[in-house]
Image: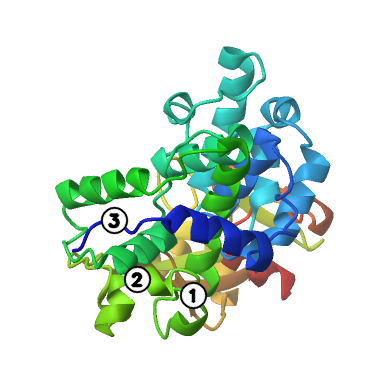
Amino acid sequence: MKGLPAGFAGRVVRWQRTHGRNSLPWQNTRDPYRVWLSEIMLQQTQVAAVLGYYDRFLARCPDVQALAAASLDDVLALWSGLGYYSRARNLHACAQQVVQVHGGSFPRTAAVLQTLPGIGRSTAAAISSFCFGERAAILDGNVKRVLTRVLAFGDDLSSGANERVLWDHARALLPARELQENMPRYTQGLMDIGATVCLPRNPSCLICPVQPQCAAAAEGRPEAYPVKTRKLKRSAESLWLLHAQDGDGSVWLQKRPTPGVWAGLYCLPVFGSRDALEEALPGSSRGELRDVEPFVHVLTHKDLHLHPVRAVLPTGWNAGEGAWFGAGDWARLGLPAPVRRLLERV
């Protein structure tokens, strides 16, 4: 790896001003609540998927006090379908802590922001940079790709020690003056380059604002970076979902335990086998079960092979904790995306 490129931050700032993304609904604001909400929603989620959720969330919870006062069920319902539901639980806990511990105002430094639930080092830096102009480095997945390519940083990021070195480089590259103006643009510019130009495959090097300083481009092999050898091991699990309806068309739903898959969400009863599902039903209903075509739902580290089974049951039936919900009720609950799709198809 060569030395750090001089003037790198200035290139990013100038490019972002004229070519970066500047019209997203969470931009052009220094309201830490709105910036924080967008940063959490955008973790592992594309901008296009977040846009509608962001607007609906603000309509229901326009500020941190409203979010703190909302019930967790309401928050999960607003989040339903966006995935990675631990983000929603942490969002709610964070809002309550901001209100209870910090008087309803977000801390102004990345160091203190990082102590709040669900806010990691990079997210804390993004909030403090965007809202308060703090000289703090971000290092999410896109930014790691940009910086490792610019620096030809070939050390394995599976190693914590190597990642700490990259953090040091990220801090050294930050703007040094006019921080109130330059830090938000620099932070956004790195995000924009990573999301729209410096792509994992087939990066658009010819239009990249930092291409003249990019050591990986000079080598002719930008896709060799970043280096990370440790791969996440994927697993698979088969689950049977009991889609029980009564004579009025209401559906039986239970709240999922925490921790676990879909923790805290309302869900169809889940079983580890079809035999276990049958055993939970009255004997007279077992012959009337109807299997729905199974499908796969992909989580970050696991493939869920879901086997829905439909049954019409008497209203008095119950499978432990849970309740019957009519269509007007379950539609407003926090439901796992595959369960919501299954119910909407009926």
194 sits left or right of 185 in the view: left
- Give the mark nearer the N terminus: 1 vs 3: 3
Is residue 243 depicted above or below 329 in this figure? below
Is residue 128 or residue 74 the one in the foreground? Answer: 128
- Give the mark nearer the N terminus: 3 vs 2: 3
Residue at position x 48%, y 37% from top? Answer: 124
> Where the N terminus falls, by quadrant?
bottom left
Residue at position x 44%, y 38% from top? Answer: 136
Q: Position of residue 328 (x, y in %)?
A: 84, 55
Q: Position of residue 100 (x, y in %)?
A: 60, 14
Secondary structure beneath dot 3 equals loop
Q: What's the CA distance linking mark 2 and mark 1?
A: 9 Å
Neighbourhood count class around disc 1 (C-alpha, 10 Å): few under 14, some 14–19, many 20 upward: some
Residue pointed to by mark 3: 4
Marks 3 and 2: CB-CB under 8 Å? no
Neighbourhood count class around disc 2 (C-alpha, 10 Å): few under 14, some 14–19, many 20 upward: many
Which amino acid is tagged 3? Leu
Residue pointed to by mark 2: 214
Q: Position of residue 126 (x, y in %)?
A: 52, 43
Secondary structure beneath dot 1 equals loop
Q: Single out the mark in the foreground, 1 or 3.
A: 3
**Which label was assigned to residue 143?**
none
Neighbourhood count class around disc 3 (C-alpha, 10 Å): few under 14, some 14–19, many 20 upward: some
Which amino acid is tagged 1? Cys
Judged from this view, the residue extending furthest toward the front is 6
